[in-house]
Image: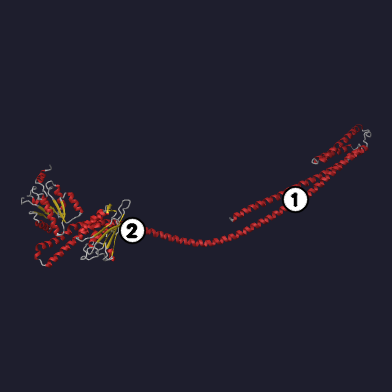
Amino acid sequence: MNRALQFRRRLGGTGAAVLLILFLAFFLAFRYGTETVEMSARVAHTQDVLSVIARARQEDATWAYLWTRDTQLPELFRDNHRRLVEVLDHLRALTSDEPEQQELLDELAPILTTHVDSQDQSTGPSVATAAPSAPNRTDPLDIAPVLHRISEIFDRLESQERTLLEQRSIAFQKNASETRMVILAAGFITFSTFLIGGYLIQREILVRASIEAGLRHAQELLGGKYEIQRSELGHTMEDLHAQIRARQKAEDELRSLNQELEKRVEKRTAELQETNHELEAFSYSVSHDLRAPLRHMDGYSRILQQEYGPQLPEGAQHYLDRVRSAATHMSELVEDLLHLSRIGRQVPQRRMVCANELLEEAKAEVLPEAGDRAIHWKVAALPEVEADSGLLRQVFSNLLSNAIKFTRRAPRPVIEVGSRKEKGGIVIFVRDNGAGFDPCFADKLFGVFQRLHRQDEFEGTGIGLATVQRIVHKHGGRVWAESQVGQGATFYFSLPMKAKNGQDIPELIGAST
Amino acid sequence: MNPQEYEILLVEDDPADAELTVLSLRKERLANHIEIARDGAEALDFLFCRGAYAGRSFERPPRLVLLDLKLPRVSGHEVLRAIKADERTRAIPVVVLTSSNQERDLVECYHLGVNSYIQKPVDLLKFQEVVRQFGMYWLMVNHEPPATAFTAASRGPQ
């Protein structure tokens, strides 16, 4: 817990207790003090009563008169008696809280009144007649018990009051000593509270001072670290700003590069379109114009042989054959090139087609190339595939034509066609037991004009497999071959299933080799 | 048959090609009278009896037109279009004899109403065989349009 809060809570509790104790101590001291004052007042009061009683006793003219019957005394007696009555009234008021004294005073009052009245009667005529007072004189013997009784009452009054005084004095003494004790105790408590409080506060101050010192130390340490970190942060920020600037610059460059690239792409696209047009014009021109000279070469050589054959020496016949076969080969090249170029521009129209049907059509087309050789065909049931029927037929006819060509020297030629399922599509293969090829050159197989056999071994233009590859790529598939020299060859091509959204699978990059 | 009648109009700019074609036709004895036009304009003059051929009559058209497509001045396509667009020449059978097997040529020619489309083989023996076949067909097997097909046309639509 927080130390300050803890201290505050402890201080609050202790402070409340101390305040309560101090309050109690002072309250007791105050009460005892007040009681002492009251008691001292009571003692003084009792002393007053005693002095009043003494004064009443001193009003002895009454007694003298009663005793002497001296008529000379009436005036003095009257004053005396009046004062006595006043004193007694005073005394009655003073002792109103003491019933015993009241009783005594009640007894005293009628006694005094009776005697004074009788005196008045006797003195009256004497004043008027100024004569015989003797017959009215009270007998001293009659008076004696009354006086005795009065004296007795006074004695009792005095003794009771003295007893009271003594009691009150003792109580006062006791109270005074208790008051001293209480004040002493209150003082002690106050003093010790101050001491303890002071000690606790002192201790707290010391603890706080040490904490403060620790804190200051920590702060200094932290300050140092903070400074280091701040400077590090400053560096980092600078680095960051530099990076941001560099990135912005890079982005600007990238943007301008992109714009340039877009312009280039536009330009290149325009160029490409132009090239395409040129290519089309070229192939059109090739189609029309390149064949004519070949036809003339072949035509005139043939006419020469037809019309002047018998007159020509053997060598001339042979040379004319060479001219004609060159023209024929050139014509095939032109034909295949035009075909390849046409496939390049063609967009495949893909739909579900029966591969076996197309295979049979292709087989019928190329079978004449086998001549009278007996070929053993092993054609498996092929699945329906999603392809352009014309193009797929072309693939089959090229592959079968190759197989027929390269099994020419095989004693028992076998051509096998089959398929297998593959992830996302199907793989179809055409296998033969013909001449085969060196697998080192397998990657050259599908390039245009690439041939792995000499023309005098197996004739060809080197365009057939390039055409196969182009068609398969246009369908989103792959084409590859496996072989060993003299062990036959297997050509594979895959046909992926068409994407579900109905769009054609884009032609692979590099498909247009 | 009137010996003045031209049996075949050969429209061919290349003299070698023209010679080989004529040799092949003669070899089969398919045509006695062959007129050769060296470009499209000349062919149109002949067919529409104008210019150098102003003395000719629409009523004596050639029995067959052998038309090359790639020609100077006026192309084979335009000659074909002109022939098939005019009532007076529309009935003349036109055989396109060309090096090209380009799809767009085939499509265009058939759209214009060509009667036959033949690609010239490079091999002379094959060419001679082709010439023999179409010559036999168009000049011997096929019934040629009657003379009224041209005279009626010249009077306007019936």
Q: Earlier in the sequence, mark 1 or mark 2?
A: 1
Measured along the vertical axis of the image, is residue A123 above or below residue B153?
Answer: above
Instruction: State the residue position of label 1.
Output: A179
Q: Is residue A21 visible?
A: yes
For residue A464, what is the image quadrant?
bottom left
**Quarter where residue B14 is shown:** bottom left
Q: At numbered mark 2, what does the secondary structure look like: helix, strand or loop? A: helix
Does A446 appear above or below A40?
below
State whether residue A267 appears in this view: no
**Label 2 sits on residue:** A257
In the image, is A513 to the left or to the right of A199? Answer: left
- Mark 1 lies on a secondary structure that is helix
User: Rounded to the nearest whole Å, what is the CA distance between mark 1 and mark 2?
Assistant: 106 Å
Front residue (pair A261, A159): A261
For residue A398, what is the image quadrant? bottom left
Pick whichever, A405 or A195, lies toward us: A405
On the same chain, marks 1 and 2? The answer is yes
